[in-house]
Image (spheres, rainbow, N blue to C red):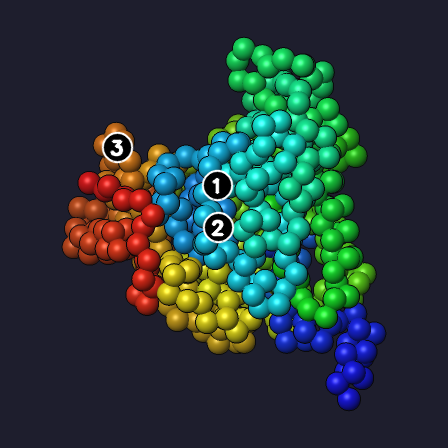
Amino acid sequence: MKLFCVLLFCMLGISAFTADKPNVIIIYTDDQGYGDCSLLNPDSKFKTPNIDRIGSEGIVFTDGHSSNTVCTPSRYALLTGRYSWRTYLKKGVISSPDKPLISNDRATLASLLKRNGYNTAMVGKWHLGMTFNEDGSKILDGPIQKGFDYFWGIPASMNFGHCAWYDMDFAKVAPSLWTQKKKNQIAISDYRIIPPYEKTPPKKNPISVAADFEDIKVLERFTEKAVQWIDKVHKDDKPFFLYMPLTSPHKPVIPQERFRGKSQAGSYGDFMIETDFWVGEVMKALEDRGIYDNTMIIFSSDNGPENTYPKRMVLHKHDSNHNLRGGKRDIYEGGHRVPFLISWPAKLKGGVTYNKPVSQIDYFATIAEIVGDKMNATEGEDSFSFAPLFYQKQPVTREAMIHHSIKGQFAIRKGKWKYISSLASIKTKTIKPGLYNLEEDLAEENNLLDKHPEIAKELEAKLKKIISSGKTREECTTKNDTPVNIQ
Protein backbone atom coordinates (compact mmCIF):
# COMPACT_ATOMS: atom_id res chain seq x y z
CA MET A 1 0.00 0.00 0.00
CA LYS A 2 2.82 2.40 0.89
CA LEU A 3 4.56 1.68 -2.43
CA PHE A 4 1.27 2.27 -4.28
CA CYS A 5 0.88 5.69 -2.62
CA VAL A 6 4.43 6.70 -3.51
CA LEU A 7 3.86 5.67 -7.14
CA LEU A 8 0.58 7.56 -7.27
CA PHE A 9 2.18 10.72 -5.95
CA CYS A 10 4.98 10.42 -8.49
CA MET A 11 2.46 9.99 -11.33
CA LEU A 12 0.77 13.19 -10.20
CA GLY A 13 4.11 15.02 -10.10
CA ILE A 14 3.98 15.29 -6.29
CA SER A 15 6.32 13.41 -3.99
CA ALA A 16 5.02 11.56 -0.95
CA PHE A 17 7.06 13.89 1.23
CA THR A 18 5.71 17.11 -0.31
CA ALA A 19 2.13 15.99 0.28
CA ASP A 20 2.73 17.16 3.85
CA LYS A 21 5.41 19.81 3.38
CA PRO A 22 5.42 22.38 0.56
CA ASN A 23 8.26 23.24 -1.71
CA VAL A 24 9.44 26.74 -0.80
CA ILE A 25 10.77 29.35 -3.21
CA ILE A 26 11.86 32.81 -2.11
CA ILE A 27 12.26 35.29 -4.99
CA TYR A 28 14.05 38.36 -3.69
CA THR A 29 14.41 41.44 -5.83
CA ASP A 30 16.97 44.17 -5.28
CA ASP A 31 15.93 47.83 -4.71
CA GLN A 32 12.32 47.29 -5.81
CA GLY A 33 10.04 49.88 -4.26
CA TYR A 34 6.52 49.30 -2.94
CA GLY A 35 5.17 51.16 -5.97
CA ASP A 36 7.09 48.99 -8.44
CA CYS A 37 4.43 46.28 -8.32
CA SER A 38 1.25 46.98 -10.28
CA LEU A 39 -0.87 44.96 -7.84
CA LEU A 40 0.09 47.42 -5.10
CA ASN A 41 0.22 50.54 -7.26
CA PRO A 42 -2.77 50.97 -9.60
CA ASP A 43 -1.06 54.04 -11.11
CA SER A 44 2.13 52.17 -12.00
CA LYS A 45 3.47 52.96 -15.46
CA PHE A 46 4.17 49.29 -16.13
CA LYS A 47 2.48 45.98 -15.38
CA THR A 48 3.93 43.08 -13.39
CA PRO A 49 1.35 40.32 -14.08
CA ASN A 50 3.41 37.39 -12.82
CA ILE A 51 4.41 39.09 -9.59
CA ASP A 52 0.80 40.27 -9.20
CA ARG A 53 -0.39 36.69 -9.62
CA ILE A 54 1.54 35.61 -6.52
CA GLY A 55 -0.39 38.14 -4.47
CA SER A 56 -3.78 37.60 -6.08
CA GLU A 57 -3.54 33.83 -5.58
CA GLY A 58 -2.29 34.17 -2.01
CA ILE A 59 -1.74 36.81 0.64
CA VAL A 60 -0.90 40.45 0.06
CA PHE A 61 0.90 41.90 3.09
CA THR A 62 0.35 45.65 2.84
CA ASP A 63 2.50 46.34 5.93
CA GLY A 64 5.46 44.07 5.11
CA HIS A 65 9.05 45.13 5.71
CA SER A 66 12.66 44.33 5.05
CA SER A 67 14.68 44.49 8.25
CA ASN A 68 17.04 47.14 6.92
CA THR A 69 17.18 49.76 4.20
CA VAL A 70 20.13 48.27 2.30
CA CYS A 71 21.19 44.96 0.86
CA THR A 72 23.45 42.88 3.10
CA PRO A 73 21.67 43.31 6.45
CA SER A 74 18.25 42.56 4.96
CA ARG A 75 19.57 39.31 3.45
CA TYR A 76 21.12 38.28 6.74
CA ALA A 77 17.83 38.80 8.57
CA LEU A 78 15.80 36.96 5.95
CA LEU A 79 18.00 33.85 6.09
CA THR A 80 18.60 33.77 9.86
CA GLY A 81 15.54 35.30 11.54
CA ARG A 82 17.90 37.67 13.37
CA TYR A 83 18.76 41.35 13.09
CA SER A 84 22.09 41.97 11.39
CA TRP A 85 23.18 44.73 13.79
CA ARG A 86 23.62 41.96 16.37
CA THR A 87 26.66 40.91 14.32
CA TYR A 88 29.81 42.90 13.53
CA LEU A 89 27.91 44.79 10.80
CA LYS A 90 26.60 47.98 12.45
CA LYS A 91 26.10 50.04 9.28
CA GLY A 92 26.22 49.79 5.51
CA VAL A 93 26.94 46.66 3.49
CA ILE A 94 29.93 44.39 3.08
CA SER A 95 32.19 44.00 0.07
CA SER A 96 33.47 41.11 -2.04
CA PRO A 97 35.57 39.41 -0.90
CA ASP A 98 34.75 39.99 2.74
CA LYS A 99 34.35 38.12 6.01
CA PRO A 100 31.13 36.08 5.83
CA LEU A 101 28.41 37.72 7.90
CA ILE A 102 26.69 34.41 8.65
CA SER A 103 28.85 32.20 10.86
CA ASN A 104 28.96 28.51 10.01
CA ASP A 105 27.32 27.56 13.31
CA ARG A 106 24.37 29.91 12.71
CA ALA A 107 21.09 28.29 11.58
CA THR A 108 19.74 29.54 8.26
CA LEU A 109 16.53 28.82 6.40
CA ALA A 110 18.60 26.44 4.27
CA SER A 111 20.01 24.47 7.20
CA LEU A 112 16.63 24.47 8.97
CA LEU A 113 14.88 23.00 5.93
CA LYS A 114 17.74 20.65 5.19
CA ARG A 115 17.39 19.07 8.65
CA ASN A 116 13.70 18.65 7.83
CA GLY A 117 14.43 16.63 4.70
CA TYR A 118 14.56 19.32 2.01
CA ASN A 119 16.83 19.69 -1.00
CA THR A 120 18.22 23.23 -0.79
CA ALA A 121 19.59 25.61 -3.42
CA MET A 122 20.58 29.22 -3.81
CA VAL A 123 20.67 30.75 -7.30
CA GLY A 124 21.42 34.44 -7.59
CA LYS A 125 23.28 37.23 -5.81
CA TRP A 126 24.70 36.36 -2.37
CA HIS A 127 26.16 39.61 -0.93
CA LEU A 128 26.67 38.18 2.56
CA GLY A 129 30.42 37.90 2.40
CA MET A 130 32.61 35.26 0.79
CA THR A 131 36.23 34.27 1.05
CA PHE A 132 38.18 33.00 -1.96
CA ASN A 133 41.45 31.39 -2.88
CA GLU A 134 44.21 33.60 -4.25
CA ASP A 135 43.00 33.89 -7.85
CA GLY A 136 39.28 33.99 -7.02
CA SER A 137 38.56 30.73 -8.83
CA LYS A 138 37.31 28.93 -5.70
CA ILE A 139 34.96 30.00 -2.90
CA LEU A 140 36.33 28.93 0.47
CA ASP A 141 33.36 30.08 2.55
CA GLY A 142 30.00 30.88 0.96
CA PRO A 143 26.45 29.54 0.51
CA ILE A 144 27.48 25.86 0.47
CA GLN A 145 28.84 26.32 3.99
CA LYS A 146 25.54 27.85 5.16
CA GLY A 147 23.21 24.93 4.46
CA PHE A 148 22.73 25.04 0.70
CA ASP A 149 23.26 21.84 -1.28
CA TYR A 150 23.66 23.79 -4.51
CA PHE A 151 24.84 27.30 -5.41
CA TRP A 152 25.01 29.05 -8.74
CA GLY A 153 25.41 32.79 -8.91
CA ILE A 154 27.54 35.84 -8.20
CA PRO A 155 29.15 36.97 -4.93
CA ALA A 156 27.63 40.47 -4.57
CA SER A 157 26.38 43.48 -6.49
CA MET A 158 28.33 43.81 -9.72
CA ASN A 159 30.08 47.03 -8.68
CA PHE A 160 31.86 45.12 -5.87
CA GLY A 161 33.86 42.92 -8.22
CA HIS A 162 34.43 39.18 -8.53
CA CYS A 163 32.01 39.35 -11.45
CA ALA A 164 32.10 35.72 -12.48
CA TRP A 165 29.72 32.78 -12.78
CA TYR A 166 30.22 30.55 -9.75
CA ASP A 167 28.92 26.97 -9.86
CA MET A 168 28.98 25.43 -6.38
CA ASP A 169 32.34 26.65 -5.02
CA PHE A 170 34.08 27.14 -8.36
CA ALA A 171 34.17 29.84 -11.05
CA LYS A 172 33.64 28.58 -14.58
CA VAL A 173 36.16 31.25 -15.60
CA ALA A 174 38.18 32.96 -12.87
CA PRO A 175 37.79 36.75 -12.45
CA SER A 176 41.33 37.42 -13.70
CA LEU A 177 40.60 40.57 -15.73
CA TRP A 178 39.74 44.11 -14.66
CA THR A 179 37.31 46.87 -15.45
CA GLN A 180 35.62 49.85 -13.85
CA LYS A 181 32.16 51.35 -14.11
CA LYS A 182 31.36 52.43 -17.66
CA LYS A 183 28.59 54.80 -18.61
CA ASN A 184 25.15 53.27 -19.07
CA GLN A 185 23.58 54.85 -22.14
CA ILE A 186 20.04 53.65 -21.45
CA ALA A 187 19.38 54.53 -17.78
CA ILE A 188 19.46 57.49 -15.39
CA SER A 189 22.74 58.05 -13.46
CA ASP A 190 23.88 54.50 -14.05
CA TYR A 191 26.80 52.31 -15.10
CA ARG A 192 27.65 49.09 -16.97
CA ILE A 193 30.02 46.16 -16.42
CA ILE A 194 30.94 45.48 -20.06
CA PRO A 195 34.00 44.71 -22.22
CA PRO A 196 36.62 45.61 -23.10
CA TYR A 197 38.21 44.18 -19.96
CA GLU A 198 41.83 44.85 -19.07
CA LYS A 199 44.70 42.68 -17.82
CA THR A 200 45.74 45.21 -15.18
CA PRO A 201 43.51 47.02 -12.66
CA PRO A 202 42.61 50.66 -13.29
CA LYS A 203 43.90 53.22 -10.78
CA LYS A 204 40.42 54.13 -9.54
CA ASN A 205 37.66 51.77 -8.37
CA PRO A 206 38.93 48.54 -9.97
CA ILE A 207 36.39 45.75 -10.50
CA SER A 208 37.59 42.18 -11.04
CA VAL A 209 35.76 40.33 -13.79
CA ALA A 210 35.82 37.07 -15.75
CA ALA A 211 36.31 37.13 -19.51
CA ASP A 212 32.91 35.51 -20.13
CA PHE A 213 30.88 37.74 -17.80
CA GLU A 214 27.99 39.74 -19.31
CA ASP A 215 26.00 42.04 -17.05
CA ILE A 216 22.92 41.99 -19.29
CA LYS A 217 22.65 38.19 -19.11
CA VAL A 218 22.50 37.89 -15.31
CA LEU A 219 18.72 37.53 -14.87
CA GLU A 220 18.45 35.10 -17.75
CA ARG A 221 21.30 32.93 -16.43
CA PHE A 222 19.85 32.88 -12.93
CA THR A 223 16.46 31.73 -14.25
CA GLU A 224 17.99 29.12 -16.52
CA LYS A 225 19.97 27.59 -13.65
CA ALA A 226 17.04 27.75 -11.21
CA VAL A 227 14.75 25.93 -13.64
CA GLN A 228 17.43 23.32 -14.35
CA TRP A 229 17.78 22.64 -10.62
CA ILE A 230 14.01 22.41 -10.13
CA ASP A 231 13.88 19.94 -13.01
CA LYS A 232 16.60 17.86 -11.38
CA VAL A 233 15.10 17.62 -7.88
CA HIS A 234 11.33 17.85 -8.30
CA LYS A 235 10.87 14.09 -8.67
CA ASP A 236 12.79 13.32 -5.48
CA ASP A 237 10.83 11.82 -2.60
CA LYS A 238 11.31 15.02 -0.62
CA PRO A 239 10.50 18.72 -1.06
CA PHE A 240 12.88 21.49 -2.08
CA PHE A 241 13.83 25.01 -1.01
CA LEU A 242 15.09 27.51 -3.57
CA TYR A 243 16.38 30.93 -2.52
CA MET A 244 16.55 33.11 -5.65
CA PRO A 245 17.85 36.64 -4.98
CA LEU A 246 17.82 38.62 -8.23
CA THR A 247 19.97 41.62 -9.17
CA SER A 248 17.13 43.79 -10.47
CA PRO A 249 16.06 46.54 -10.51
CA HIS A 250 19.36 47.44 -8.76
CA LYS A 251 21.90 49.23 -10.93
CA PRO A 252 22.98 48.57 -13.61
CA VAL A 253 19.50 49.02 -15.10
CA ILE A 254 19.98 46.98 -18.26
CA PRO A 255 16.83 45.49 -19.81
CA GLN A 256 17.53 43.19 -22.72
CA GLU A 257 16.67 44.55 -26.15
CA ARG A 258 13.40 42.60 -26.42
CA PHE A 259 12.02 44.35 -23.30
CA ARG A 260 12.99 47.92 -24.19
CA GLY A 261 10.18 50.37 -24.82
CA LYS A 262 7.60 48.06 -23.22
CA SER A 263 6.85 50.36 -20.27
CA GLN A 264 5.91 53.98 -19.75
CA ALA A 265 8.63 54.44 -17.15
CA GLY A 266 11.79 54.37 -19.23
CA SER A 267 14.49 51.73 -18.92
CA TYR A 268 13.68 51.21 -15.24
CA GLY A 269 10.11 50.22 -16.09
CA ASP A 270 11.39 48.01 -18.91
CA PHE A 271 13.78 46.33 -16.46
CA MET A 272 10.91 45.63 -14.08
CA ILE A 273 8.93 44.12 -16.96
CA GLU A 274 11.91 41.88 -17.71
CA THR A 275 12.17 40.95 -14.03
CA ASP A 276 8.50 40.02 -14.02
CA PHE A 277 9.03 37.88 -17.13
CA TRP A 278 11.73 35.78 -15.45
CA VAL A 279 9.58 35.38 -12.33
CA GLY A 280 6.90 34.04 -14.67
CA GLU A 281 9.35 31.55 -16.19
CA VAL A 282 9.99 30.06 -12.75
CA MET A 283 6.25 29.82 -12.12
CA LYS A 284 5.74 28.19 -15.53
CA ALA A 285 8.43 25.62 -14.69
CA LEU A 286 6.48 24.66 -11.57
CA GLU A 287 3.24 24.34 -13.53
CA ASP A 288 4.82 22.29 -16.29
CA ARG A 289 6.08 19.80 -13.71
CA GLY A 290 2.79 19.58 -11.83
CA ILE A 291 4.17 21.01 -8.59
CA TYR A 292 2.83 24.56 -8.62
CA ASP A 293 -0.04 24.02 -6.17
CA ASN A 294 2.12 22.61 -3.41
CA THR A 295 4.84 25.21 -3.76
CA MET A 296 4.90 28.23 -1.48
CA ILE A 297 6.25 31.22 -3.41
CA ILE A 298 7.46 34.13 -1.32
CA PHE A 299 8.16 37.36 -3.18
CA SER A 300 9.73 40.48 -1.69
CA SER A 301 12.51 43.07 -2.01
CA ASP A 302 15.55 43.82 0.13
CA ASN A 303 14.76 47.54 0.58
CA GLY A 304 13.04 50.49 -1.02
CA PRO A 305 13.88 52.09 -4.38
CA GLU A 306 17.24 53.60 -5.33
CA ASN A 307 17.50 57.37 -5.06
CA THR A 308 16.72 57.83 -8.76
CA TYR A 309 13.03 57.44 -7.89
CA PRO A 310 12.29 61.21 -7.72
CA LYS A 311 13.60 61.59 -11.28
CA ARG A 312 11.26 58.85 -12.47
CA MET A 313 8.36 60.70 -10.91
CA VAL A 314 9.31 63.86 -12.81
CA LEU A 315 10.07 62.16 -16.13
CA HIS A 316 7.45 59.41 -16.19
CA LYS A 317 4.97 60.09 -13.37
CA HIS A 318 5.87 56.70 -11.92
CA ASP A 319 6.00 56.62 -8.12
CA SER A 320 8.38 53.83 -7.05
CA ASN A 321 7.91 54.51 -3.34
CA HIS A 322 4.12 54.92 -3.73
CA ASN A 323 3.58 58.04 -1.63
CA LEU A 324 5.79 56.76 1.17
CA ARG A 325 8.48 58.98 2.62
CA GLY A 326 12.02 58.22 1.53
CA GLY A 327 13.61 55.31 -0.29
CA LYS A 328 16.65 53.07 -0.11
CA ARG A 329 18.95 53.89 2.85
CA ASP A 330 16.26 55.93 4.66
CA ILE A 331 14.76 55.04 8.04
CA TYR A 332 11.35 56.21 6.80
CA GLU A 333 8.73 53.82 5.38
CA GLY A 334 9.93 54.17 1.80
CA GLY A 335 13.22 52.63 2.86
CA HIS A 336 11.85 49.37 4.22
CA ARG A 337 8.14 48.91 3.40
CA VAL A 338 8.35 46.65 0.35
CA PRO A 339 6.29 44.31 -1.86
CA PHE A 340 5.53 41.29 0.34
CA LEU A 341 3.48 38.57 -1.37
CA ILE A 342 3.03 34.85 -0.67
CA SER A 343 1.12 32.18 -2.58
CA TRP A 344 0.52 28.50 -1.79
CA PRO A 345 -2.47 27.27 -3.84
CA ALA A 346 -2.75 23.99 -1.93
CA LYS A 347 -3.53 25.96 1.25
CA LEU A 348 -4.69 29.38 0.06
CA LYS A 349 -7.63 30.27 -2.14
CA GLY A 350 -6.24 33.75 -2.71
CA GLY A 351 -7.62 37.21 -2.37
CA VAL A 352 -6.33 37.61 1.19
CA THR A 353 -5.01 40.96 2.40
CA TYR A 354 -3.19 41.24 5.71
CA ASN A 355 -2.62 44.76 7.00
CA LYS A 356 -0.71 44.22 10.25
CA PRO A 357 3.09 44.60 10.53
CA VAL A 358 5.23 41.67 9.43
CA SER A 359 8.90 41.43 8.56
CA GLN A 360 11.06 39.28 6.33
CA ILE A 361 12.78 38.32 9.57
CA ASP A 362 9.56 36.38 10.32
CA TYR A 363 10.03 33.97 7.40
CA PHE A 364 12.28 31.84 9.61
CA ALA A 365 9.74 31.14 12.37
CA THR A 366 6.86 30.90 9.88
CA ILE A 367 8.51 28.28 7.71
CA ALA A 368 9.74 26.42 10.78
CA GLU A 369 6.16 26.15 12.06
CA ILE A 370 4.84 25.01 8.69
CA VAL A 371 7.34 22.14 8.45
CA GLY A 372 6.96 21.22 12.12
CA ASP A 373 10.36 22.38 13.34
CA LYS A 374 10.39 23.62 16.94
CA MET A 375 13.36 26.03 16.59
CA ASN A 376 15.82 25.93 19.42
CA ALA A 377 16.75 28.73 21.81
CA THR A 378 19.80 29.81 19.82
CA GLU A 379 18.19 30.55 16.46
CA GLY A 380 15.63 32.88 14.92
CA GLU A 381 15.97 35.20 17.92
CA ASP A 382 13.87 37.98 16.37
CA SER A 383 11.47 35.93 14.26
CA PHE A 384 7.71 35.52 14.85
CA SER A 385 5.49 33.12 12.94
CA PHE A 386 2.55 34.21 10.83
CA ALA A 387 1.89 30.60 9.75
CA PRO A 388 -1.67 30.55 11.18
CA LEU A 389 -2.69 32.75 8.23
CA PHE A 390 -2.25 29.77 5.94
CA TYR A 391 -4.79 27.82 7.97
CA GLN A 392 -7.41 30.59 8.08
CA LYS A 393 -6.45 31.61 11.60
CA GLN A 394 -5.16 34.86 13.00
CA PRO A 395 -1.52 34.81 14.14
CA VAL A 396 -0.45 36.14 17.51
CA THR A 397 0.17 39.88 17.31
CA ARG A 398 3.81 40.41 16.39
CA GLU A 399 6.16 41.75 19.03
CA ALA A 400 7.67 45.16 18.32
CA MET A 401 9.63 45.38 15.06
CA ILE A 402 12.96 47.18 14.73
CA HIS A 403 13.97 49.16 11.64
CA HIS A 404 17.60 50.03 10.94
CA SER A 405 19.16 52.30 8.32
CA ILE A 406 22.40 52.34 6.37
CA LYS A 407 23.94 54.79 8.87
CA GLY A 408 22.96 52.74 11.91
CA GLN A 409 19.84 54.66 12.89
CA PHE A 410 17.07 52.81 14.77
CA ALA A 411 13.30 53.03 14.69
CA ILE A 412 10.74 50.83 16.43
CA ARG A 413 7.28 49.87 15.26
CA LYS A 414 4.52 48.61 17.54
CA GLY A 415 0.94 48.55 16.30
CA LYS A 416 0.09 51.85 14.65
CA TRP A 417 3.02 53.70 16.24
CA LYS A 418 6.46 54.18 14.73
CA TYR A 419 9.12 55.91 16.77
CA ILE A 420 12.32 57.09 15.11
CA SER A 421 14.89 57.17 17.88
CA SER A 422 18.00 59.26 18.35
CA LEU A 423 19.76 55.98 19.15
CA ALA A 424 22.19 54.56 16.61
CA SER A 425 24.40 51.48 16.43
CA ILE A 426 27.40 53.65 15.52
CA LYS A 427 28.50 57.21 16.20
CA THR A 428 26.61 59.46 13.86
CA LYS A 429 25.32 63.00 13.55
CA THR A 430 22.43 64.01 15.77
CA ILE A 431 19.25 62.38 14.59
CA LYS A 432 15.96 64.15 15.01
CA PRO A 433 13.52 61.80 16.77
CA GLY A 434 9.98 61.41 15.49
CA LEU A 435 6.74 59.70 16.46
CA TYR A 436 4.22 58.83 13.76
CA ASN A 437 0.75 57.31 13.72
CA LEU A 438 0.96 55.20 10.56
CA GLU A 439 -2.76 54.44 10.51
CA GLU A 440 -3.45 58.13 9.94
CA ASP A 441 -0.16 59.34 8.50
CA LEU A 442 1.52 56.73 6.33
CA ALA A 443 3.59 59.43 4.63
CA GLU A 444 5.15 60.35 8.01
CA GLU A 445 4.42 64.05 7.63
CA ASN A 446 3.15 64.81 11.15
CA ASN A 447 5.61 64.34 13.99
CA LEU A 448 3.54 63.69 17.14
CA LEU A 449 6.45 63.50 19.56
CA ASP A 450 5.48 66.64 21.44
CA LYS A 451 1.86 65.51 21.75
CA HIS A 452 2.59 61.97 22.97
CA PRO A 453 5.95 61.96 24.80
CA GLU A 454 4.76 59.08 27.00
CA ILE A 455 4.35 56.79 23.96
CA ALA A 456 7.82 57.72 22.71
CA LYS A 457 9.27 57.01 26.15
CA GLU A 458 7.63 53.58 26.27
CA LEU A 459 8.85 52.68 22.78
CA GLU A 460 12.37 53.91 23.50
CA ALA A 461 12.54 51.67 26.57
CA LYS A 462 11.36 48.67 24.55
CA LEU A 463 13.85 49.46 21.81
CA LYS A 464 16.72 49.56 24.30
CA LYS A 465 15.62 46.27 25.84
CA ILE A 466 15.44 44.46 22.51
CA ILE A 467 18.78 45.84 21.38
CA SER A 468 20.68 45.10 24.59
CA SER A 469 19.14 41.71 25.36
CA GLY A 470 20.28 40.08 22.12
CA LYS A 471 16.80 38.79 21.33
CA THR A 472 13.16 39.66 20.77
CA ARG A 473 11.76 36.21 21.53
CA GLU A 474 11.95 35.79 25.30
CA GLU A 475 12.75 32.07 25.15
CA CYS A 476 16.02 32.62 23.29
CA THR A 477 19.33 32.49 25.13
CA THR A 478 21.89 34.06 22.79
CA LYS A 479 23.46 37.49 23.11
CA ASN A 480 24.65 39.98 20.51
CA ASP A 481 27.79 38.82 18.71
CA THR A 482 29.42 42.17 19.38
CA PRO A 483 28.21 45.03 21.60
CA VAL A 484 25.69 47.49 20.20
CA ASN A 485 26.91 50.68 21.81
CA ILE A 486 23.75 52.77 21.72
CA GLN A 487 23.66 56.20 23.35
Residue at point 77%, 51% (across, down): 228
What residue is disc 3 on? 427
Foreground label between 2 and 1: 2
Q: Residues within 10 Å of mark 1 (few under 14, many from 20)?
A: some
Q: Residues within 10 Å of mark 2 (few under 14, many from 20)?
A: some
Residue 104: assigned label: 2
Label 3 near label 2: C-beta < 8 Å?
no
What residue is disc 1 on? 100
Q: What residue type is disc 1 on?
A: Pro
Q: What residue type is disc 3 on?
A: Lys
Residue most extreme to the right: 11
> Residue 91, located in which quarter of the rendered image?
top left
Q: What residue type is disc 2 on?
A: Asn
Foreground label between 2 and 3: 2
Circle 3: element type: loop
Of 184 and 166, which appears nearest the observer? 166
Circle 2: element type: loop
Circle 1: element type: loop
Residue at point 67%, 44% (across, down): 168
Image coordinates of residue 478 in percent, x first then y, are 33, 58
